[in-house]
Amino acid sequence: MRLLEGLQTVVVTGRYVRPDGRPCRGSILIEPEPAQLTSADRGIAVVGRAEAQLDESGRFTLELLATDAAGISPSGWRYRVTERWSDAPGRTYTMALPASEPTVNLPAVIPPPAPRERPVSRERPAAEERPVSRERPAARRAATDAGAGWTEPPPTDDAGADGLVYNAREHGLAGDGTTNDQPALQALVDTLGGACAADGLRRVVYCPPGVYSIRDAGTVWRSGVSLVGAGPGATRFVLSNAGNRADPTPLAFFTAIEHGAGRDNHLADCTFARFEIDGSGVVLSRYHVLAKGLGLQYMVRGRFRDLYIHDTAATGLGCDFLQDTLIEGVVARRCGRLDSGVQMGGAGIGIGIGGWGAIERLTITDCIVTGNGTNGIFLELQEDMWPPPRGIRIIGCHTEDNRYGISDWGAEGLIVSACTMIGNHEAGFDISGLGTASIAGRGGIVTNCVIDRNIGDGLGIGNTPGPYTFTANRISGNGRYGYRQHNIGRGNQQPTGDIALNGNEIWANALDGIRVDADLTDAALVDNRVRNNGRCCAPGASGGGDGVSYTALTLSDRGADWPPDGHLGKLLTVGAEHVLVTGNTATELRLGPRRPGATTAWDGGTPPDGTPYELPDAPEPRAGVTVDAVARRLTVRGNRIWDNQDPGTQTYGLWITERGSCVSGWVEDNNLVGNAVDGVRFDTPPAGGCWRDNHGVDNHGVDDQGVDRHGTGDRR
C-alpha cells in the first residue's frame, strides 16, 4: 500500500494468542474496497493492499489511510480484513478506520466470534487486550453503525472445523452472470486440492451471493475441497455449453471412465452445500448421461446439503459409490429433461451402488424430487457380479410427478421410511430389473409411507428374489393397482420369496387393491385393511360438440353424470391422442401430464372445444386381492377386505383367476364380508393348506384343508 504525505492515517496493531498462551501463526491481509482510491488534488493516494505477518509473539503493526481521510474519493469506502491462520480456519470481514481513533487494536475492535459463531480455530485465538469501557471504540462504532462487521463464512458443520475457507470472489470468480467462471473455479479447485494432498487439511470454496456462469466444460473435482454458497437463490451456478455443444458441462464431476476414480483414487471429505444449479442452458444433440448437476463417483464422507438442482439434461444429483455419506435437504425439479424415460439416468437423485462392496453407508433424508424424467430417487447396482450393498436409507423424502417415485434396482436391505410418493407416472415405489445390471433390490423395508394418487401403481414389485417387507403404509387412490407383483422382460423371472404386506391401509385404488401377476412363494398378507378398491367402475362414455371443453389438464362435459373417480386410470381417446385419467367429478376428467414435469396432457396441443372423445368400459372383476399367478404357501391372516360404499366398487374380497392358483396356503381369521358381489371368487379352487374361520368364504366349496368339495373350479 502506498501513502502520500499529509493524509490522515490510522495505526492498526494487535496480538493473537491461543487460550494456552501460545502465539498464533499467520498473517493479516487488509485491502481497500475499492482497490484504487484517489485524491482530487494529489492523484492516486492508495494502490494495492497491505499484509503483515505475525511475529514470534503473535503481533503485527500496519499504518493505513483513514477511511474518512479528507479529499479521498469515493466516499464511504471501507477495508476488507482477512485473517489467515496457518493451522486453523480464517475469516473475512469489513470495517471502517476513522481518523478520530489514530490507533486501533484490531482484536479488541473486532473480537473473535463467540463459540456459537464460526470459531477461528478449535482453540480460538484470544486478544491480548479487551476494552474495559462499555463505550464502543470509534472504529467499532463505525463498522457496526454502517451495518458492517465480519463477512460470515460457512458454518463449521459444512466447512469443517479444520478447513480453510477461500472466498471465490477473491480468487478469480466474478459471480456476475456474464463472466465464464469455470476456468477460475477449476484453477481454484486444483490449487486447493493440491494443497490438501500436501498437508492433509481440507479446504472450502465459499461463493458469496451471485450468479456464477459455468460454460462449455465441467469442473473436475479434487479430494478435500468443498463448495459452499450463501443458499439456493442467493448463490446460483448456471450451466451452459453454447461454445462447446459436445460437452455435457456438469458443475462438478469425477468419474471412473474420465478420471480413473476408484477405491484407491476417491474423493474424501467433500461438502456441497447451500447453492442452486440451473442446468437449463445445456443443449445437446442427443442425451448424454453426464449432463448432470453433480456427477461424482467413489466418495468417502461426502455431504450434499440444502441444494436446489433443476432443469438438467440428465440426472440432477447423479453420484455413485458413496461411503459414509449424507444427502440432506436436496430439491431436484425437472431433471432428466432430455431423457425419454428409457435411457440411463434422468432422475432427480440417482445413486449408483456396489463400488465399495457389501456395505455402503448412505442416508438420503428430507429431499424433495418432482417432475424428473425417470425416477425421483433411484439406487442402481452398477455391475451384476457385485454383491448388492447394505446400509442405505431413504427417510422423509417427497417424490411427485416422476416416472417412478423411488426405485430399488439392486440394494440389499434398503430402508424407506416416512416418505410421500404421489402422482408418479408408473409407480410410487418400484422394485425391478430396469437398472444397468438388471438386478432388483431385495431384503428391504418400506414403512410408514403415503403412496397415493400415482398415475400407475402404488407399489410395482418384480424381478426380485425377495424378501421384502411393506408395513404400516397408506396405499390409496392409485390409477391401477395398490400393490402389484409383476416381472418385466429382463432380470430375475423366478418366483419371489418372502414378500410381506403387514398392517397396510389399501383403499380407493382404480383396480385391485393387491394384484399378484408373478409367482410368489411364502408370501404373507397379515392384518391389512383392503377396502373400496375397484374405483374404475364407470361404463364406457363418449361425447363431443356443445358442452365439451378442454384445458391443458382437463376435459369437461356439461352433459355427463359420472360417478366420482369412476374413470380413474382409464385411457381417454381424443382423435390420435391417448391420455390417462387421474380422477373425475360428475362432469370433469383430470388428466395426467404427457410426461413428468410437463404442464399439459397433450402432445399436439390442447384440442379445440367440442372435439369428440371416448372412454372404454370398466374392467371386471375388481377385487381386494387377486391371485393371477402361482402362489405357494401363501399366508393370508387377520385381514379385513370389504367395501362400504353405496354402490360398492370392489366386486370381490379375494379372487383366484383361471391362470392363478393358491397351493398349500394358510388362510385364516379373515373377514371378507361386505364386498359388492361376494366375499370370494374361485375360478381356480385353492389346493391344500389350511382354510378356517374366514367370514365371507362360507358355501364356496372349500373345507378346512383347502380342498374343493364340489369338484369344480368355478365357485362364484
Image (cartoon, grey):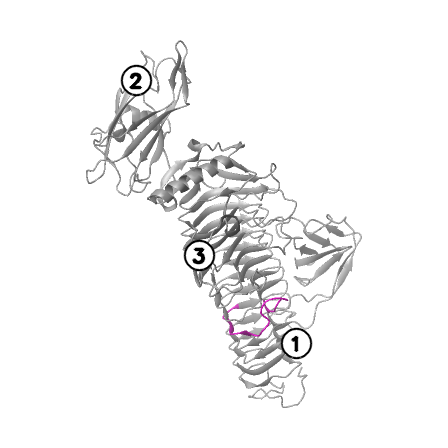
Pinpoint residue 366: horizontal percent, then vertical percent. Answer: 46, 53
In whole angstroms, how far apart are the C-alphas of marks 2 and 1? 96 Å
SS at mark 1?
loop
The residue to which callout 3 is attached is: 363
**Depicted 240 relative to depicted 443: above or below:** above
Residue interval drawn in magenta: 483-504
Q: Residues within 10 Å of mark 3 (few under 14, many from 20)?
A: some
Q: Earlier in the sequence, mark 2 or mark 1?
A: 2
What amino acid type is highlighted by mark number 2? Thr
Q: Locate the C terminus and report the quarter of the image it occupies.
A: bottom right
What amino acid type is highlighted by mark number 3? Thr
SS at mark 3?
strand
Q: Hey, which quadrant is residue 217 in on the image?
A: top right
| Depth order, front residue of 683/106 | 106
Q: Is residue 285 left or right of residue 116?
A: right
What amino acid type is highlighted by mark number 1? Val
The residue to which callout 1 is attached is: 677
| Camera sees residue 204 | no
**490 falls in the magenta region:** yes
The residue to which callout 2 is attached is: 9
Q: Hey, which quadrant is residue 427 in on the image?
A: bottom right
Which numbered mark, 3 or 1, is in the foreground of this view? 3
Q: Residues within 10 Å of mark 2 (few under 14, many from 20)?
A: many
| Depth order, front residue of 589/333 | 333
Q: Hey, which quadrant is residue 454 in on the image?
A: bottom right
**Depicted 687 relative to depicted 590: above or below:** below
Q: Earlier in the sequence, mark 3 or mark 1?
A: 3
Residue at point 64%, 78% (across, down): 660
In whole angstroms, how far apart are the C-alphas of marks 3 and 1? 46 Å
